[in-house]
Image (spheres, rainbow, N blue to C red):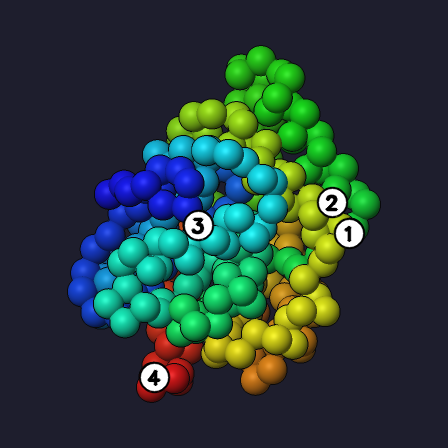
Amino acid sequence: MKAPLNGTELSWEQRGEGDLMVFVHGLSENHQTWTQQVAEFSKRFSAVAIDVRGFGDSEVGTAEGTPRQLADDLAAVVKHLARDGRAHVVGFSMGGVIAVRFALDRPDLARSVVIASSSAAINDAGFQWFQQRLEAALTHTREDFDRLNADDAQTMLVGGQQVRVETYLRIRKASVKDTAGYANACQAMQTLRNHPLLDELQNVRCPALVLTGELDLSCPPKAAMSIQRRIPNSCLSILPGLGHLAHQQDPELFNRVVLDFLNSTAGS
């Protein structure tokens, strides 16, 4: 599905009926990264996996390079689809940043938030990592960019079960149709160096679950702990034996932990 929202064309996959549940992918991904989650949660919810602005079939539009713009896109989708105007939101990595910004800016729309394998701040090394990818997206040949993108994917697959590797690599390559969208996302993530979300987390008012893989090298458990202890009444889950891509490495465990959390917040 696709619609003109928040100044661009945003795309998503939707299955099932019930309360709205929106999944937000990470950098250089698209809605297909959530296949295992949409299949499961659509049994109970209206499960929606979006393409973030500039990825998959969502257009870049006028790029601002900020988490707030990407969160505003999410809010526009929620308002467009939610029967009661609210949604459960699950965000992975970059998507976790978007989900947090959404919960902070639009508490009226956030029924609950799951922050998976994510971070609320980056250091100078993280800033330079995104700067290198931004420059590669804008100045390198597409072949060189795709090679770097594949190398990054292999790093994320370290730790935990090595499943669906080729499928994941295809998703990453296909998700970046316009490298300007990738560059825009890198710029948004770079803002976390000078404008981290840590001090704002105390203002998240909806039920929140923070989770990550025990072996996550990209956003290690200490990052999840740093987020969880700042969000009032939030829950923390460290998934044993899993890496950054926990929702793909062991979808059954990931889904069960999220569903248990949602059951605990029923009526919120």
Instruction: Residue at 70% x, 52% y: name it.
Output: 192
Q: Kindly report the distance in space between the C-alpha atoms of the residues bearing marks 1 and 3.
A: 23 Å
Mark 3 touches mark 2? (CB < 8 Å): no
Name the residue tied to disc 2: 126
Estimate the x, y position of residue 197 in percent, counting from the top left.
67, 62
Mark 1 touches mark 2? (CB < 8 Å): no
Name the residue tied to disc 3: 73
Q: Quadrant of residue 224?
A: bottom right
Name the residue tied to disc 1: 194
Q: Is residue 132 above or below residue 126?
A: above
Quadrant of the snapshot with the C terminus = bottom left
Q: Kindly report the distance in space between the C-alpha atoms of the residues bearing marks 1 and 4.
A: 37 Å
Q: Quadrant of residue 52?
A: top left
Mark 1 touches mark 4? (CB < 8 Å): no
Q: Kindly report the distance in space between the C-alpha atoms of the residues bearing marks 3 and 2.
A: 25 Å
For the residue marked with disc 1, what is the amino acid?
A: Asn
Estimate the x, y position of residue 94 in percent, counting from the top left.
55, 50
